[in-house]
Image (tube, coloured by chain):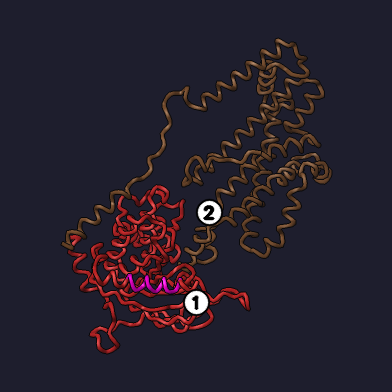
Amino acid sequence: MNTTVLMDAPAARRPHPNPAPEGEDARPRADYIRIEGLSKTFGAGSGGVLALENIDCTIQQGSFVTIVGPSGCGKSTLLRILAGLLDYEVGRVMLDGQPIHGTRRDVGVVFQSSILLPWRSIVDNVMLPAEVLGLDRRQARERAMQLLHMVRLDGFEHKLPRQLSGGMQQRASIARALLHDPKILLMDEPFGALDAMTRERMNLELQRIWMESGKTVVLITHSIPEAVFLGDRVFVMSPRPGTLERVLPIDLPRPRTMEAMSHPAFASAAASIRERFSHAASFD
Amino acid sequence: MTTAMLSSAPQAQGAPDASVKAPRRRRANPLASTRVQSVLLLIALLGAWEAAARLFKVSRFLVPTVSDIAVALWRGLATGPMAKDGFWYHGGVTLAEIALGFFVGGGIGLAIGIVVSQMPKLEMLLEPYVAALQSVPKVAVAPIIVVWLGFGIGSKVMIICLLTFFPVLVTSIAGFKAVDPDRIDLLRSLSATRWQIFRKAKFPSALPYIFAGLNMAAAFSVVGAVVGEFVGAQAGLGVLILQMEAQADTAGSFAVCVVLSAIGILLTSLLRRVQRRVLHWMPADTSQRTVNV
């Protein structure tokens, strides 16, 4: 049964990897996130550091975008701006037609570490957004249990975070980010602290969760294979100042399995990103 | 084939993650327990004291024997609750001073600590004053306080307040400073209000620090009560010690010290019990760590 869900979902939910120009697609997808001429400087005057320079991009509803770049390319800054945690002065960032200034209720954020509150049980941690946003407790609890089931943490609901492994903690934090049913999920290097094996499994899990939930996902990573494996499109960023170098559509069928990594399209995409990085690095 | 991969993957994923730490168990043999061993050590030390005092014929006015102290302790305890020469009356007065001073001083310290740490500018403004006042030996101020507030219970409570206020203030400020900024970001990302951020992230994060301060304050409060009573009081265990010393009743003084230690132990274990309940989520070895003064 599990299998049918997974097999059916992609046909229904999979966004077009390379969206056709408007009007040509039968169901044109709205530009859910639209960034125009975004620049961000930290500090003022001559000591100011330009973290992002003139970013232009759009992200379609329901799509999976990965942002990859070396450290210092401003990818976390971009995500914090999208999450409303950081304000900006130059450019426009629109979400669903409205400019982003401050945090929003329809956004869920997964951070680099799980940031589970150690005094709360797993289910109470997942319930946190409901408490903060004042949602109906009983419904939220039901949803929390379903989400914990989705991230395969059945039986761990009443454990404390420290009783769980790192991978399990990060899965719980994904469930928490989904509790208030946000339309968009922002993930800042969510698997960076995990070992390679766990990370691969988490990538598969995340793909499944995304396909089941139909959210728009923006995921930051410094791992090229992870970016290519997960993304419908990969945004390649380069550092000092952080700019969006190019947008690379990944035309691999969903659901992708670990075997997709040996697909020629995967290899060529990864190679072209890697080539960008080594090119950029030669200027350092 | 893809189907097979997908359906088998989830099972494979659950397995290695399920390694949850097993809770540590205490061993059953009573002699192996450190608690029993420390009681045995106490008995051995008291026996050695008794033997040495008798063997070397030390003057009772200098070092009484353990049995003398035990007799004095019994005499003090076998009194009515209002007997002016009994331990219950004086112990009750001292305990009341300690309880009042601890709650008022610690409470004000915590309240100011909370307010100050929510306002970074106020914190910077007050920081040098806190540091300067903290280094004033509060015991030195005790005579002045007695002059101001008289020989009643009020001056003692005030001295204890001074002693308990600072450790709680300083540790709570440190606790709020040490809150993981990620936790605040997490709540901000959910559009939490300042009050929600405080209640759901900052305050619980600062609690281990606050408890460290309260533990210090509990130890200080016993010292404060006795010092206050030494300087000038009508009742209390400190007064009793002075009276006994005046009558050269050294065994009696020692007995009062035993009572004071018992009060100290009582306070610490009560506080520890509360701490264990509040900080139930911390691993046992870290939540039980206390600050010794």
Q: Nearer the viewer, residue A222 or B143?
A: A222
Q: Nearer the viewer, residue A154 or A166?
A: A166
Which quadrant is the C terminus of chain B positioned in?
top right
The location of residue A265, given as percent across then percent down, is: 26, 72
Q: Is residue A172 magenta?
A: no
Q: Residue at x 69, y 49 (%)?
A: B166
Q: Is residue A103 visible?
A: no
Q: Crowding at label 2, few (<14), some or many (≥20) Cα neighbours within 10 Å?
A: many
Residue type at the position of mark 1: Leu
> Chain letter of disc 2?
B
For this orientation, the residue located farthest to the left is B1
User: What numbered label is drawn on residue B205?
Assistant: 2
Give the spatial CA distance, label 2 vs label 1: 33 Å
User: What numbered label is drawn on residue B125?
Assistant: none
Magenta residues, start to end: A270-281
Q: Is residue A275 magenta?
A: yes
Q: Which residue is mark 1?
A: A52
Q: Is residue A6 above or below residue B265?
A: below
The location of residue B59, given as percent across then percent down, is: 77, 14
Find chain A in the image and tell me its colour.
red
Q: Which of the 4 image quadrants contains residue A126?
A: bottom left
Q: Residue at x 74, y 19 (%)?
A: B63
The location of residue A200, given as percent across then percent down, is: 31, 59
Give the brown chain's letter: B
Secondary structure under tag 2 reads helix
